[in-house]
Image: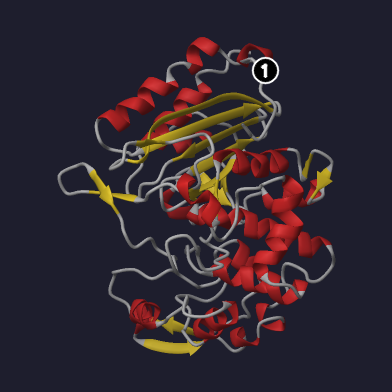
Amino acid sequence: MNYGLPRAIPEDVGMSTERLARIKPAMQQWADDGKIPCALTMIAREGKLVHFEKIGMQDVATAKPVEFDTIFRIYSMTKPITSVAVMMLYEEGHFQLNTPVSYFIPAFKDMKVYANHGDAIIDAEREMTIKHLLTHTSGLIYGGDWLHPINDRYREADFYGGDLSHMAEKLGKIPLLHHPGDAWNYGMSTDVLGYLVEVVSGMPFAEFFKKRILDPLGMVDTGFAVPEEKADRYATLYEPTEAGGIQVLDNAPVSSGPLSFHHSGGAGLQSTAADYLRFCQMMLNYGELDGERLLGRKTVELITLNHITEDWQPLWRTGCGFGLGFAVVTDVAETHTLGSLGTYSWGGLASTTFWIDPVEDLIGLFMTQLIGDNPFHAQFRVLVYQSIVD
């Protein structure tokens, strides 16, 4: 079985086996109460795997248990990998962070902006840059149900009806929510970065991922599609019911079929816990894993700095700022949980999440398949940190 990293006894890396044993029953209770279908929990410290447990079902209806090699939709956990791809090209000298996006993608030249709460459309005060995309300060969004004409435009646009150039052309015709650099708003920025990788590298985005990141890191079960021979390992996706349970969500977002997804730089990947752990460990190692170097140390340091102002907390994550593709803890007390200054993280739509703590040389990873609220994340984080005893 591939566990991603070498295994170790918790006490060898300053953690308690007895305290780690608190995790499984806590997660099991969520499954027993019908709140989640399954959970894979993983903890690594000092480059060694010290905890990897599974509870619940990959598919509830058929009582198929989740396995250590179950494949999950990781959705927005794609974003950090896309951001790393961009920074690899940055290291090669193809652009600077303040290079206008329109230099590579002409559709983003002469962008317009909604003003006065959408009542007017004006010229953007400045060009959108690559850093704006990396930090989600571009003015691009995902769309929502609040009253604003931009939401109507996003709903009408068929972003996933063609290739990545099709997506960029559609986005370039929709005014931005705000001037680039004026606010933080989660959205299509990283999808555009995926197309940027394609344009700059001269190879299809999925091919760049495979050749330059996934294969070198040994992420053998990660990709934009699940091969037929691995279909039995693909987890079913769920959503909450009004009665407080869960039900199957048949039409998975960003999906073009049961086993294949659009090549979305923001949300398109499927992966396993072991595969994603290897990506996290590469970042914790400042760009290198098992002799394969993807990034230089100073680049990782730049990626994991906070690049936004204090009042732009990403998705209401108190105590956090945002780096180049990751949320970054800037005030531990304000996070209202255990952790360390400089910890960086992100999660996905189906309640997958990870964090990387350079102070404690620690990685936490949680996998399930539920689109909805995820209070179990905070509980898992506390259970991880309370097990540190060195």
Residue 53 in the image: state x and y as whole percent. 49, 26
Residue nearer the viewer, 59 or 228: 228
In the image, is 296 to the left or to the right of 178?
A: right
- As drawn, 252 above or below 290: below
The picture quadrant where one finds residue 340 is top right
Quadrant of the drawing holding the N terminus: top right
Q: From where the camera sits, is residue 308 visible?
A: no
| Number of numbered discs on residues | 1
Q: Residue furthest left?
A: 243
- As drawn, 214 above or below 37: below
Mark 1 packing: few (<14 Cα in 10 Å), some, or many (20+)? some
Residue 194 in the image: state x and y as whole percent. 62, 68
Residue nearer the viewer, 226 or 376: 226
Image point 52% across, 56% down: which residue?
228
The picture quadrant where one finds residue 224 is bottom right
In the image, is 27 to the left or to the right of 186?
A: left
Image point 58% across, 77% down: which residue?
164
Residue nearer the viewer, 266 or 60: 60
Q: From where the camera sits, is residue 175 visible?
A: yes
In the image, is 207 to the left or to the right of 169?
A: right
Residue located beneath label 1 in the image: 13
Quadrant of the drawing holding the C terminus: top right
In the image, is 259 to the left or to the right of 81?
A: left
- As drawn, 12 above or below 283: above
Image point 82% across, 49% down: which residue?
296
- As drawn, 310 above or below 36: below
Residue 175 in the image: state x and y as whole percent. 47, 84
Figure colour scheme? secondary structure
Q: Amino acid at mark 1?
A: Val
Residue 76 in the image: state x and y as whole percent. 50, 55
Q: Secondary structure at mark 1?
A: helix
